Amino acid sequence: MRDDINKAVLNALSECRSIDGRQVGELEKSLAEYVGVKHCVSCANGTDAIFLMLAAWGVGKGDAVFVPDFTFFATAEAVARTGAVPIFTDVQRDTFNMDVQSLDSAVQRVKNSGRLNAKAIVAVDMFGLPANYPELSAVAEKYGLLLFQDSAQGFGGEINGRRSGSFGDAGAVSFFPSKPLGCYGDGGAVFTNDTEKVEVIRSLKCHGKGENKYENVRIGINSRLDTVQAAILQVKFDAFKNRELAALQFAAELYNKHLHEKWNSPVVPKGFKSAWAQYTIRFADEYQRDAVQKKLEETGIPTMIYYPKPLSRQQAFKNLEKFEDCPNAEELCKTVLSLPIHPYITIEEICKTAAVINKF
Ligand SMILES: *Cc1c(COP(=O)(O)O)cnc(C)c1O
């Protein structure tokens, strides 16, 4: 894509609209169309995107927001930044996503405690697989909760033909370079069908602007996607939807086929499509996982442990009250290993990685 990206960058630079250039609006329009919602608002990163949607719906002090215990820190950090309290729920071992039973029980416990206002769910599309939004929506409806999507890893995923980003009240994505659709730095976006809230999001991301930037009607933040990043994303988005997503699916299927079944390949429920932000397998225990990782490293194959620690045990959250035990999250931190995957990985690379692992 080098020539196309170079051209897009040079165009953006020569147009001299480094903030809010035409590419930003064009990109927002085509992303909203792809996701299948009315509005897309770009911003500086995925963490801000989560914060902006929570803040636009009025989540704040005194509110409880339910998040999975097994995710990247930013999911709960964005909640805490609004003044609300993150409540950790367990996840399913096979899909890595929020466990609906655990969510239901956490909501009941928060309601019974009477100390916090049960307000919203932020579900995460872990490793690219959409969370179970049909089931999560039912819980949200049962208890009158807002439902938000942290789809930082999930852009391109689907449930029964409906794209990630379009579920619940709003969805947030990240364009961090390692995400399914990455730019050359930081970027993010919020997706929603809510035409009123979208105005609040646009205000919040620009210092709480009113009629214009120098009329400030609320306290906001400064969060925007640079024109040059939007220009790069326009080129990369074309490749993503036309080729890369299919290449990722092919790579994941090849891993599934070549890895011995005892390694617990990632489960994709019927009707779901993963965006394959990561290809993550589960081992019997920490010792086996660490031994395989070491062997792969010696062979020159890089792997990562996403994530080594559940959020509830992060120092930053050590003073939070616990409403649910999260044994699956604890276990996954000890047993998961993410293997190399990207749209340009070769068949030989996948076979070689699988062969090293299968030897164990
Ligand atoms: C990457 C990520 C974020 C944060 O996105 P940034 O663009 O890095 O701020 C939030 N949640 C999850 C699950 C992520 O993987």
Image (tube, helix red, strand yellow):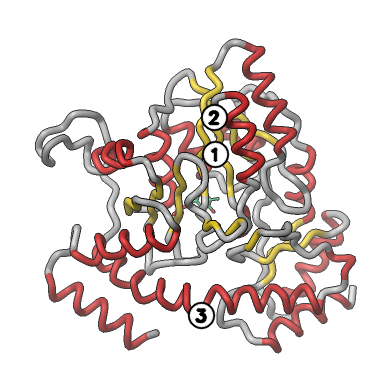
Q: In this view, does 244 lie above or below 21?
A: below
Residue 42 occupies quadrant: bottom left
Amino acid type of disc 3? Answer: Arg
Amino acid type of disc 2? Answer: Val
Amino acid type of disc 1? Answer: Val
Q: In the rendering, which numbered label is found on residue 44? A: none
Tell which circle, 3 or 2, labels the residue nearer the N-terminal end: 2
In this rendered view, identify the residue nearer to me: 102 or 214.
102
Residue 158 visible in the current orientation? yes
Q: Residue at x 72, y 60 (%)?
A: 268
The answer to whether residue 213 is left or right of residue 84 is left
Q: List the residue tagged with mark 2.
A: 65
Residue 153 visible in the current orientation? no
Circle 3 packing at 10 Å, graded few (<14), some (14-19), many (20+), is few
Q: In which quarter of the image is the C terminus?
A: bottom right
Looking at the image, which residue sits at the far top? 114
Q: In which quarter of the image is the N terminus?
A: bottom left
Pointer 1 with pointer 2, Cβ within 8 A: yes
**Label 1, label 3: how many angstroms apart (C-alpha)?**
30 Å
Tell which circle, 1 or 2, labels the residue nearer the N-terminal end: 2
Q: In the rendering, which numbered label is found on residue 243? A: 3
Q: Position of residue 303 (x, y in %)?
A: 67, 68
The answer to whether residue 245 is left or right of residue 45 is right
Q: In this view, does 119 lie above or below 285?
A: above
Q: In this view, does 175 lie above or below 54?
A: below
Q: List the residue tagged with mark 1.
A: 122
Q: Residue at x 48, y 50 (%)?
A: 166
